[in-house]
Image (cartoon, grey):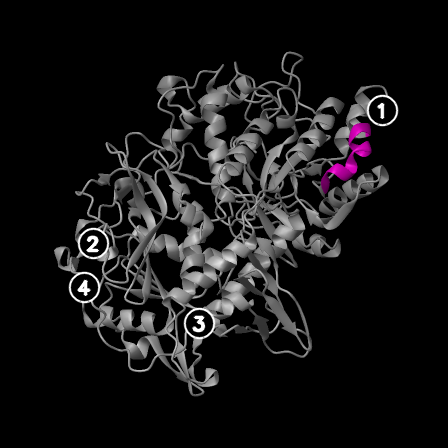
Amino acid sequence: MGRPTRLAAAWAAGALLAVAVPVAGAQAADTTPRIDLRVLVVDDGGPATEAIRAELDDAGTPYTSVALGDAGRPRIDDAFLSDTVDGRPRAKFQGVVLPNDSPFGANSPEMTALASYEKRFGIRQVDAYTYARPAVGLNTPQDSGYSGTLDGASAQVTASGAAGPFGYLRKNVPFENNDPGVNESWGYLSTPLDKQADGATFTSYLDAPIPGGTGRGSLIGQYTHDGRSELVVTFVYNQYQQQFRLVSRGMVEWLTQGVHLGASRNYFAVHVDDVFASDDRWDPKLKCTPGDVDCPGNPTPDHPALRMTAADAQYAKQWSQSHNLPLDLLYNGVGSEEYKADHGGAPDPLLNQLVADQKSFRWVDHTYTHAFLGCEQNTTVVPWKCATDLLGNTRWVSAATINGQINDNLNWGARQGFTLDRDELVTGEHSGLKMLPQQTQDNPNLAPVLAANGVRWIGSDTSRERQQRPVGTALTVPRYPMNVFYNAGTAAEETDEYNWLYTKKADGGSGTCENSKVTTCLASPLDVKSGFGSYIVPLESRIALGHVLANDPRPHFMHQSNLSEERIGYTVLEKTLADYAGLYADSTPIVNLRMRDIGTELSKRSAWKSAVASGVTAYRIGSAVTVGAPAGVETTATFPEGTVQLKGATTSPFGTAYAGARSGWATPAAGQAQLTFTLPAAAAHATPAAVPGTAHAVPGTAHAARVQDPAARLSIPQGVARPVPYGPGPGARR
């Protein structure tokens, strides 16, 4: 079971009260300040601040970025940080992200202004990457600590971190080590000072064993001093590294005190293409796939096509139920009809089994015959190219053909009793959509047919087009190809083809990886007997998990062949799910959406991103949060448990529970121009009363002078400055 949400609420209330500075005898209406829901990011151009900006961008959390090295940047002073609106003091930013704890220099006018601002309004500060030293409540690494690489280290959430901002994690936070020859991480492990400055405390949230010692050193901790709170981070990271993705949610929740626009969840959906059809099989001798245009010969009895059996279908149902992960089956009806024809009209056992278990899956139209629906292909050359007429104009597959492929499959599925959504479609090979280099535009016949058939969501390939885009009245749903090949039913076949694609010619490979700018060659061929389990599965599951942890709802896809014979597709999925379960608490489950809902989520995010760019008004006064967004645009937010939305004279709970908070989308009630939320009583104390006349320097610790410029001691290894890839990228065969 996940930790009780009241624990998170109690943490938020207690921590915030610790930095609030009330004014005795003041009237609430006069002293309760307005806190705008916007983050200030002071950016030094380094990977750590870039990572935090990326996290805010992906979640949809508004922020203002100030480039530290820009000569024309605004000056960080009282006027920049706060003012008065309608007679009420206003904090323009709800949190401050700095590249380190003192980027402007200790006791500089800008640091003094920031410190005064944070103290006055109870605003928190994240030190994105700073040197461990007394100025941030820590001993220096030289004093029985450690400074150096953290590749492969296993950090852990402390009891305080679990009771506070990192309660959504199970405990373990592993640091990546993708390439033993490259330093991918760096940090400073240090213990809190035995004697802090008067009134100061340091609470570690994430720590790790100190190499060569017996103690544990902090990597993330809260330093509370002088009426302010800093989140002190003493390791460097980039936005792609798993260790950052694991802790980024907690960093933002701590910074914003659990109240912010934007939301983040962990998504995983799996599409299984070509159900009922047969997929051609890789030939390890020919090093190609008979049946493909670039492979001589045809499938033989020695290498028959791959097709799921009734037993495979039963296993798919049981697996899906036991792993709590519904599979989306993308079907081609002709495959079942061809099976019947090839077996003298006998019933198709696979069809019978899937019809019996149809409610265990979600069904998506994948066209009737899996025909290519883009340009007419000239396959007399390799690679193929678009056929042209006598005038040199591209010859396109007709609207009638596209319409027939869509409707013949829907009608066939309806005859089987499948529950279908006509608004979802994935064409064979994502054809009809532009496909570089051969086809530089969509088939002009595609969009009108989609509109006529009510198709609103059409699958695309993220390796070609990552972003959602319109195709007439429809929108694409980009899908991640999994590097479990469509033409492999066994681990040996998968590994042999993998070696062919990702080894050098000198090692018997195709040489493709040597000519590609994005693919990393294998150092040497994998063992065909063990390479799938020892290398491919860990790599592909790590890539998939990276998408899951990145607040990315885009689905992944493999093929029905991968659920047949040795069922190698499940091996990758199981490791992805197992690794996730070992990292996250029960309060933070994987979110599994069907294609339509994924498309809707991406569409809402796009509209919200545009609204944020044009200016969204959002602020908090005590327990009341007000948001104004353009008409027709839904608002995304994250609030504490117990938050309600006011809709006229009624209220309703906001969002849904996730990771110890409430998050989701909201729209104003009828007749309302803006959204209004009421935070729970515990969080109402989070906003301190305004304190007049506090624009004075905040004293530093007695040891602050030891390091005037913490950035001077910070190391950024090659693997952070330029992220180390996991390994070979997605193959060309889909």
Q: Identify the secondary structure beneath mark 2.
A: helix
Q: Which of marks 1 and 4 is nearer the N terminus?
A: 4
Q: What residue type is labelled 4?
A: Gly
Indicate the position of residue 408 as horizontal and vertical percent values.
79, 41
Q: Is residue 668 visible?
A: no
Q: What stretch is highlighted in magenta?
A: 352-363
Residue occupying the point 32% across, 73% down:
117
Residues at marks 4 and 2 touching, judged by CB atoms closer than 8 Å: no
The numbered disc on residue 723 is none
Compare residues 615 and 169 and report the one nearer the observer. Answer: 169
Q: Earlier in the sequence, mark 4 or mark 2?
A: 4
Distance from the alpha carbon under mark 2 to that under mark 3? 29 Å
Residues at marks 3 and 4 touching, judged by CB atoms closer than 8 Å: no
Q: What residue type is labelled 2?
A: Pro
Which of the two discs, 1 and 4, sits closer to the camera? Answer: 4
Q: Which amino acid does label 3 sit on?
A: Thr
Distance from the alpha carbon under mark 3 to that under mark 1? 69 Å
Compare residues 332 and 572 and report the one nearer the observer. Answer: 572
Q: Is residue 661 left or right of residue 193?
A: right
The numbered disc on residue 134 is 2
According to the picture, the residue beneath numbered tag 4 turns out to be: 105
Helix, strand or loop for the magenta stretch, by majority: helix
Which of the two discs, 3 and 1, sits closer to the camera? Answer: 3
Q: Identify the secondary structure beneath mark 4.
A: loop
Answer whether residue 361 is magenta in the image.
Answer: yes
The numbered disc on residue 687 is 3
Could you classify mark 1 by the number of other residues whose Cα lies within 10 Å: few (under 14), some (14-19), or many (20 or more)? some
Residue occupying the point 66% across, 21% down:
305
